[in-house]
Amino acid sequence: MAKNKTAYVCNECGQDFPRWQGQCSACQEWNTITEVRLGASSSTRNHQFTGYAGNTSKQVQTLDQIDLNELPRIASTFTELDRVLGGGIVPGSAILIGGHPGAGKSTLLLQTLCQLSLTMSALYVTGEESLQQVAMRAHRLGLPTQHLRMLSETSVEAICDVALQEKPKVIVVDSIQVMHMSDIQSSPGSVSQVRESASYLTRFAKQQGIAVIMVGHVTKDGSLAGPKVLEHCIDCSVMFEGDSDSRYRTLRSHKNRFGAINELGVFAMTERGLKEVANPSAIFLSRGDEASSGSLVMVVWEGTRPLLVELQVLVDNSAMSNPRRVAVGMDANRLAMLLAVMHRHGGLLMSDQDVFVNVVGGVKVTETSADLTLLLAMVSSFRGDILPCDLVVFGEVGLSGEIRPVPNGQERLVEAAKHGFKRAIVPKANAPKKPPQGMEVIGVSKLSDALDAL
């Protein structure tokens, strides 16, 4: 009888170790190393690792000899999903969609495959729900169900055997955490089962030219559950995010070998399923009837389009010896840095004030163009001054108080003008010679100039 091999793998970085240890020496995390059973050590299993990246050729070629004929992408019938994927589903790609329970992952994929099944062969594999449950959801959403092929199975080998017979163009596996392989001894959902199942499906997708979409669970901190190798072996990793008390969902790519990773797709959850939001700026600009201090609109750049988002800041006297600095939707470290810049170059001391920052709509702002907006909103809340509702601000602030330009300044101003904004405070390098019609653009180069422009 063949002897089973055992290894110890870090769940965070995927590093292998010959024995267990408390701290991973690669990523310095504690208590993340778990035992993994690799299965029987037999030379007959070596063939499953060949052709992982598709039909491999043993002949060495130069780079200019490789065929560059690009496969046509498959339109998913959702423009927002195609935007995040880089233009559509690439045949032979492995895509992983993660998100919190109830975010709408299964609903999005069921809607997509029901529409795709009208023009091509598609297979939906469910391992968590029964076929009756999926059919009830499709009937409730009013989806076309005549042509979509369904399969209830958790064995990866059986799924691939059925796919060879059905020959679909797209396969959805819901979810990867319940899949298992027969030659792995551990239970479904373990590190070894998730890693081997994802590798087997990825290899199958590339060899057969079938797009495989896998649904993944997330941990309590919001990251994808399972080993880090799961994200390394697939081609595209997408997170479906949204609060349970909000009807809007955002789709953001964390890894994409076929497109940009900073694209953002916005959906609305309705009684008839997920609907695309063609103009996300209109959602995030749903301001109240009465203007208030500390509220200001900024223009952030998400992928290939500008997005108008409202930023709210509350500055209040602190009753604690250590004032609170809370940032929702932004980096808290950057907030602390900008407070120091405001004190040094703006002359305003807020060391005895609580500062609360919130990006309306649940959007997470990662770029630096929100620096100037955040500083001016803090000044507005600190002084109690109400800023004009038709004012939009963007710009990066340096440590010496200078206002640095941001990319795509002209496109940001055009988008703001479309939504009726009449004034804009922007970096001087981003101020156009001919501003958009009906808009006054004020270019500033220092923080003091921006404060004077208020």
Image: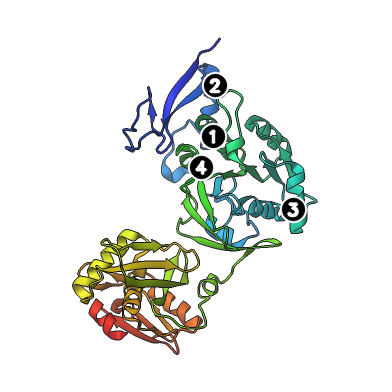
Identity of the residue drawn at 47% across and 64% down? 363
**Earlier along the polypeptide chain: callout 3 or callout 4?**
3
**Earlier along the polypeptide chain: callout 2 or callout 4?**
2
User: Residue 422: where, in percent of width, then height?
Assistant: 43, 87
Quarter of the image for the N terminus: give it: top right
Q: Nearer the viewer, residue 133 or 267?
A: 133
> Is residue 86 visible to the viewer in this orientation of the structure?
no
Q: Is residue 391 left or right of residue 120?
A: left
Element under disc 2: helix
User: Residue 139: where, in percent of width, then height?
Assistant: 78, 54
**Residue at mark 1 to residue at mark 3: CA–CA distance:** 28 Å
Element under disc 3: helix
Q: Quadrant of residue 92?
A: top right
**Residue at mark 3 to residue at mark 4: CA–CA distance:** 28 Å
- Badge 3 amino acid: Ala
- Residue hosting label 1: 194
Furthest residue toward bottom: 438
- Badge 1 amino acid: Val
Identity of the residue drawn at 28% across and 80% down? 450
- Residue hosting label 4: 234
- Residue hosting label 3: 138
**Earlier along the polypeptide chain: callout 2 or callout 1?**
2
Element under disc 1: helix
Furthest residue toward top: 1
Residue 45: which disc? 2
- Badge 2 amino acid: Arg
Circles 3 and 2: CB atoms closer than 8 Å: no
**Residue at mark 1 to residue at mark 4: CA–CA distance:** 12 Å
Of circles 2 and 1, the one toward us is 1
